[in-house]
Amino acid sequence: MSMELVPYNILDPVWLRDFYPSDLPEAWRLEYYANEYRMLFIPTDWWGQLPESDEIPEFELVLVEGDEPLLQNAAWSEVQQISTKMKQPCDGSEDSLCRWIFCNQTLVVIHLVPEDGHTLRDMRREVEGIAARFPSSQVILVIEAAPDYLAQVGILLQLMQR
């Protein structure tokens, strides 16, 4: 099983403050992001905020949330639309970090939202449950959290996949 980590909203004010250098021009943000991440998640509320298609860097996979027509960009190796009709609510416990799951023949995308009080131990427990549920799938964890928390989860995934 392979697990990839993708931030949920890299245009969130916390991301703008904590991830990007303060003097980085707005037009260079996606290029800067592409140096750290191989995949991009485009949430529904990004429509209208995306730069022109010739300014979008190459990504291994672009996940597009919503039911709008897919964006076309030659630099994107693969685009996967995550339709609201295809998302399934998580059937976890009340303390689950999972908000929704999207599955098709080739991949599983899971949206995780750690709330105040959730620790990396909680995230590990969640990831272990996901690994047990989807042992032979490519799993993409779309995590809605601050950049420093995502970095910690990235280290956790590296350690778990050894």
Image: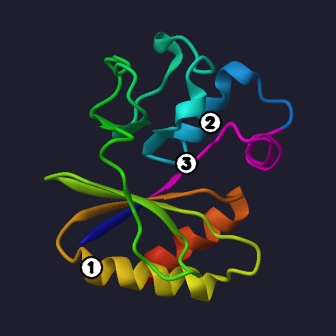
Labels 2 and 1: the sequence-earlier one: 2
Magenta-highlighted residues: 5-21
On the image, the x and y values in percent for residue 102 come to 32, 54
Q: Mark 1 packing: few (<14 Cα in 10 Å), some, or many (20+)?
A: few
The kind of residue on which mark 1 rests is Arg
Given contact means CB atoms under 8 Å apart, are the residues at marks 1 and 3 in contact?
Answer: no
Report which residue position mark 2 lands on. Answer: 32
**Residue at 34% over, 40% down:** 61
Which quadrant of the view contains residue 2?
A: bottom left
Q: Quadrant of the N terminus?
A: bottom left
**Residue at 59% over, 28% down:** 46
Report which residue position mark 1 lands on. Answer: 133
Q: Is residue 145 visible?
A: yes
Given contact means CB atoms under 8 Å apart, are the residues at marks 3 and 2 in contact?
Answer: yes
Q: Is residue 135 above or below residue 32?
A: below
Disc 3 from disc 2: Cα separation: 7 Å
Disc 2 from disc 1: Cα separation: 34 Å
- Front residue of 118/59: it is 118
Q: Mark 3 packing: few (<14 Cα in 10 Å), some, or many (20+)?
A: few
Labels 1 and 3: the sequence-earlier one: 3
| Residue 4 shown in magenta | no
* Residue that lies at the very extreme toward the left in this rendered image: 105
On the image, the x and y values in percent for residue 146 come to 71, 58
On the image, the x and y values in percent for residue 152 come to 63, 72
Is residue 102 found left or right of 157 in the rendered image? left
- Front residue of 135/29: it is 135
Q: Is residue 161 visible?
A: no
